[in-house]
Image: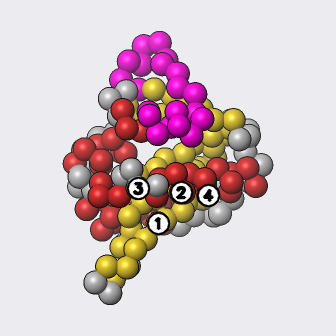
């Protein structure tokens, strides 16, 4: 289901989520995305029923970083569902789970041209930082 979800995303959505061009997840990344430990690595998936089949329409995940108390997040929503509230619901669940696991900070890196994600992140309370020498990316940070 995860692989089909990625294949169904528009080229722009895949580019902004993975910061590069890909059509599907390599086997190693697919395994990483689908085998979580529910503590250091958590994922929430939104699905719908369509024509008798369960389809993924969004996913949000975090993974612990090397910095104590900090996790990195990522989210992607199917193009047809962007702006529907699915992303906000997934992020609420993700932030709650991260807090419950003892994380104090959630961070992420976003391409500077990903205006939808930057606006969405600000609405959720993330602070945005431009790092010197890194004009193509923006660092996001949320205190949990």
Which disc, if any, is residue 84?
3
Quarter of the image for residue 31 reads bottom left
| Image marks 2 and 1: residues in contact by CB distance under 8 Å | yes
Mark 2 vs mark 1: which is more N-terminal? 1
Vertical order, 141 against 77 (above or below): above
Which disc, if any, is residue 46?
1
Q: Secondary structure at mark 1?
A: strand
Coloration of the structure image: secondary structure
Check disc 4 and report the residue beneath it.
93
Q: Quadrant of the C terminus?
A: top right
Check disc 2 and report the residue beneath it.
90
Vertical order, 26 against 70 (above or below): below
Using the numbered discs, state the Cα–Cα distance from disc 2 to disc 1 in whole angstroms: 7 Å
Using the numbered discs, state the Cα–Cα distance from disc 4 to disc 2 in whole angstroms: 5 Å
Viewer-closest of 108 and 126: 126
Q: Quadrant of the N terminus?
A: bottom left
Circle 3 or circle 4, nearest the eye: 3
In the image, residue 102 lies in the stretch drawn in magenta: no
Mark 3 vs mark 4: which is more N-terminal? 3
Mark 3 vs mark 1: which is more N-terminal? 1
């Amino acid at each position: 289901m995860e692989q089909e979800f990625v294949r169904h995303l528009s080229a722009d959505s895949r580019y902004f989520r993975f910061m590069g061009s890909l059509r599907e997840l390599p086997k190693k990344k697919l395994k990483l995305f689908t085998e979580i430990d529910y503590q250091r690595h958590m994922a929430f998936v939104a699905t719908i029923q369509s024509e008798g089949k369960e389809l993924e329409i969004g996913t949000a995940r975090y993974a612990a970083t090397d910095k104590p108390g900090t996790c990195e997040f990522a989210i992607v929503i199917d193009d047809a569902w962007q702006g529907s509230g699915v992303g906000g619901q997934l992020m609420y669940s993700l932030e709650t789970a991260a807090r419950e696991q003892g994380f104090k900070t959630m961070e992420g890196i976003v391409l500077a041209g990903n205006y939808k994600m930057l606006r969405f992140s600000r609405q959720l309370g993330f602070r945005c930082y431009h790092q010197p020498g890194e004009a193509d990316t923006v660092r996001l940070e949320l205190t949990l």
